Amino acid sequence: MSVVKLDILSDPICPWCYIGKAHLDKALAEVSDHPFVIEWHPFQLNPDMSRDGMDRRAYLEGKFGGKDGAVQAYAPVVEHANAAGLQINFEAMERTPNTLDAHRLIHWAGIEGKQSTVVDALFNAYFVQAKDIGNAEILSDIAASAGMDRDVTLRLLSGDTDAQEIQDRDAHSRKMGVTSVPTFIVANQHAVPGAQPPEMWKQIIADIQKQLKDDNGTTDS
């Protein structure tokens, strides 16, 4: 069967990205012959964040104009996460990290064919376990859990390997008009923004399958 590239721009501290992946995964699990080959791409919600991150309460109140604003902003996140059957342990989160190093890890995981496993582990570490995924030791543990070499990962994280590439790819996406994540790009042509429900993904897959079938039929005739 023909394959179709699905590029996903995401940040591992973005709750809508977490929810969006869960919706996509549900749709893919229900379609046994989906055509997608998935690649994850960097987009930092906070590209100017200190490399050490910052206190999460201060971050949220600064971003949303105080505690009430933060609560109001995250109410729909909680609602949609619950509907998707996802756990988010907001109360336990102490820091909002800079995600540059997490994106470096995702990039290296892609080289080893382990991207989706690492993305899942990052979402779980941040949203469920409330870990600081800006911490090199934690990121190296995540790498090891995905079958990557922990020591090599830790050594790479101690330097700036591929940091500029990640920043350049992030900047390129913004230049191309991406302003929020998740953003899904189907076949290098069609942008699907936001945490779309599984039903929409199943319809997109059905449309692609029909198009591929029609194209193959035309080719074979």
Image (cartoon, rainbow, N blue to C red):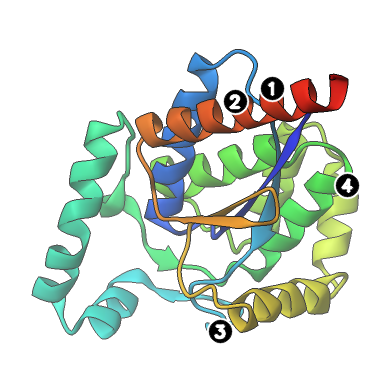
Can you tell which mark lies on residue 111?
4
Helix, strand or loop at mark 3: loop
Contact flag, marks 4 and 3 (Cβ < 8 Å): no
Q: Nearer the viewer, mark 4 or mark 3?
A: 4
Q: Residue under circle 2?
A: 210
Vertically, is 80 above or below 92? above
Q: Earlier in the sequence, mark 4 or mark 3?
A: 3
Who comes first in sequence, dot 3 or dot 1?
3
Disc 3 crowd rating (10 Å Cα; few below 14, some 14-19, many 20+) is few
Question: In the structure shown, which secondary structural element does the residue marked by tag 4 occupy?
Answer: helix
- Image quadrant for the N terminus? top right
Residue type, numbered disc 4: Ile
Marks 2 and 3 sit apart, C-alpha to C-alpha, by: 47 Å
User: As drawn, is 93 to the left or to the right of 40?
Assistant: left
Q: Which residue is mark 1?
A: 213
Question: Is the residue marked by circle 4 packed among few (<14), some (14-19), or many (20+) residues within 10 Å?
Answer: few
Label pair 3/1, CB-CB below 8 angstroms: no
Residue 112 spot, x, y in % from top left:
88, 40
Q: Quadrant of the C terminus?
A: top right
> Marks 2 and 3: which is nearer the front?
2
